[in-house]
Amino acid sequence: MSDLLSIGASGLRAYSAALATIGDNIANAQSAGYARRTLQLKGAQSAGDTPFVRANINPGGVDINGISRSVDQWLIADARISSGDAERASAKLDWMSRVESALSDESNGIATGLTQLFTTADQLTADPANRTLRSQFLQAADDVASGFRAAAGQLSDMADGISGAATSEVAAFNSNLDALEAINIGLRKARPGSTGEATLLDERDRLLDELSAQGGIDIALDDRGAATVRASGSGDLLVGGGEVHPISVTTAADGRLSYTVDGGGAFATGTGSLAGLSEAANHVADERAALDTLAQDFAAQLNAAHQAGFDAAGNPGAALFTGTSAATFTAAALTPDQVAVADGATSNGNMLAFGALRGANDPESLWAGHVAEQAQATASARAQDAAATTRADAATAARSGVSEIDLDKEAGELLRFQQAYSAAARTIQVARETMQTLLNSV
């Protein structure tokens, strides 16, 4: 009877724990990062001597063999890789779209100003003495210069914004490193197969997911589940062996970003949001340099064309623009009479030559080509983002297919273990009644 009682008691303990595990699964069905848990049970055995066999093995109920998590390490690794690629593409696309907006005519009016400049020059060829047209010509030049300054200001603000975003992202990355080391300490102390260990493993995976989405890392797990994290490529230690090495970001004068590991070398990110921000910073720096070059080229070309003529007083034409960069690009303070409409032979010859600048390499076509290049680059980034997002969604779905909670399945398991619990309780009751019957018969 004692064996029957112990069998029933072990069943009550095991099935009660199983019901608690199922309850945890149901309660956390919508919790991000929670992996489905299963209580592992095994048959207990008791040894005893019989007249025929020494140490004979008899059934002894059921033992708890620990809690297991429903995870697939290959799917987890694949989901982290695809997530890092998606975050890189998303971070880059966000700023690429802003650059496209900054270069659009709605934001700066450069294209409209250039068109108005050449249109007014054409009109002056028919009416060279018209002061209103001369004023419009100067206003168009000022609009072009203002547009360059506006675009330069927006790009400068973007460079600052990317730098600030990178600083915040690095701080979040380092916080995750610290938190991961705390989880590692907990895992080394946790009882294997316990609920506490499963909770720590869930949190470890969540932190590793975030770190992988932020930057390129390599992960190694020891036999207790503690993670050692190194920077991809360089192999510099970030977390492991009780050490945490944070990263830092440095912003160059032109806005380009560089990451370094404390006590190590460069943190070369090829994936993750930090990589996307670095690529965006490089693109903005290139655009700022290109804008400066365009401003200088436009000033040189248009100034030369205007200075080739003569103003209303017969003086040589003055420069239309001043400045050495897009941020300092300014229209000269000329009066309508100082517009150089005439050349040495006719009253409208210089405006005829000015209008003839329109062509394959005139400021209008060069600016339109530059804007088109940016639009193509943004479209390419958008396509990359769409592809990376689709890939990440598929990998996440495959991972979730293993770890997520199916409430219908949990309901079935709940019913099964409720019945098993009732059967174990009934076993104890039968043992008690049998023992009572035996005692009453004495």
Image (tube, rainbow, N blue to C red):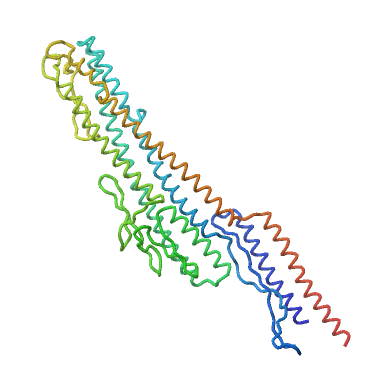
Residue 13: percent from the left, percent from the top?
Answer: 68, 72
Q: Is residue 128 above or below residue 253?
A: above
Residue nearest the viewer, comparing 201 with 89: 89
Q: Work out which residue is located at the far bottom of the displayed protein and give it.
A: 51
Asked whether, in this view, residue 414 is left or right of residue 141, the answer is: right
**What x and y, as percent, mark residue 3?**
75, 81
Q: Considering the image in quadrants, where does the N terminus appear?
A: bottom right
Q: Position of residue 270 (x, y in %)?
A: 37, 51
Residue 10 horizontal side relative to residue 88, left or right: right
Q: Is residue 352 above or below residue 381?
A: above
Q: Is residue 81 left or right of residue 425?
A: left
Name the quarter where the C terminus is drawn: bottom right
> Dividing the picture into quarters, in which one does residue 234 lie?
bottom left
Residue 369 picture location, percent across and down: 32, 29
What residue is rendered at 35% in x and 46% in y? 279
Tally the numbered discs: 0
Q: Is residue 216 above or below residue 279?
A: below
State the image quarter where residue 98 is shown. top left
Of residues 95 and 401, the one drawn nearer to the viewer in this rendering? 401
Give me the residue at 29% from left, 23% from top. 113
Q: Residue furthest right?
A: 441
